[in-house]
Amino acid sequence: MLNLIFFGPPGVGKGTQAARVAKYYDLVHVSTGDILREEIKLETELGLKVKDIIASGELVPDEFLIEVLENTCSKHPGAKGFVFDGFPRTLRQAEALDELMKRQDCKIAKVISLEVPEDELLRRLVNRAIEQGRTDDTAEVIKNRLIVYQKHTKPLIDYYKRKNIFIEVPGVGTIGSIFASLCKVIENH
Ligand code: C5P
Ligand code: MG
């Protein structure tokens, strides 16, 4: 199995690249943000619970995310691997993912961090707001999501560095050139 995590603050291009990588290597793309947005659209019980949290840019409680993770992975028993995008966001989520991997007798091969300067990040998020109309892409909520990233998610860098699987890849350039750098990193293990 090949299991990867796409890591980084909102707007670095995790979703775009994770989708391409998953398609190219025939892996399952797990975007927890997309899954939650779909739950909101369908007005499920979970969707109703997380709607306001997402709109504010805060994090959805770990137990919800861990359930989403387990449900999603169990739907793909024969998968060649998973590309996690936007998950884990907290230490507890990272530990839950490790446990899930252990239970399946596999592991995370690499945590790929896309590196993009902050002014470029903001520019992309503002563009995405115009193009996709996400409720959490307003200036104020974007600011909060970046603060939440610094506080809860950035500490995971050390967690994965200690496991020797953390890799930084420049996230600026064309979608194709970034994808090419990613393939090199993924095949080079
Ligand atoms: O990953 P993405 O940026 O699409 O996630 C959108 C929102 O979903 C986050 O800002 C957060 O409110 C929620 N989320 C979360 N925990 C995750 C993934 C997403 O709380 N692991
Ligand atoms: Mg995304």
Image: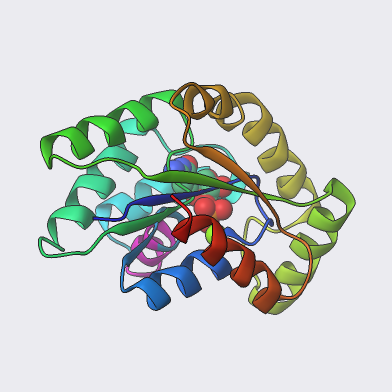
- The type of colouring in the image is rainbow
The quadrant of the rendering that contains the N terminus is bottom left
User: Does 135 sit above or below residue 143?
Assistant: below
Asked if residue 52 shows in the view, the reply is: no
Q: Which residues are drawn in magenta? A: 35-42
Numbered circles on residues, count: 0
> What secondary structure is the stretch in magenta mostly built from?
helix
Residue 140: % across, % down: 78, 46
Indicate the quadrant where residue 138 lies. Answer: bottom right
User: Seen in the image, is 27 located left or right of residue 84?
Assistant: left
Q: Is residue 168 magenta?
A: no
Taking the spot 11% from the left edge, 65% from the top edge, the residue there is 78
Residue 185: % across, % down: 54, 56
Taking the spot 14% from the left edge, 62% from the top edge, the residue there is 75
* Of residues 92 and 25, the one drawn nearer to the viewer in this rendering: 25
Q: Is residue 36 magenta?
A: yes
Taking the spot 46% from the left edge, 29% from the top edge, the residue there is 90
* Of residues 106 and 64, the one drawn nearer to the viewer in this rendering: 106
Residue 117: % across, % down: 84, 49
User: Seen in the image, is 55 located left or right of residue 24?
Assistant: right
User: Seen in the image, is 81 located left or right of residue 127?
Assistant: left
Asked if residue 87 shows in the view, the reply is: yes
User: Does 94 sit above or below residue 124?
Assistant: above
* Of residues 68 and 139, the one drawn nearer to the viewer in this rendering: 68
User: Does 122 sit above or below residue 34?
Assistant: above
User: Seen in the image, is 37 located left or right of residue 149?
Assistant: left
Taking the spot 51% from the left edge, 43% from the top edge, the residue there is 53
Q: Residue furthest right?
A: 119
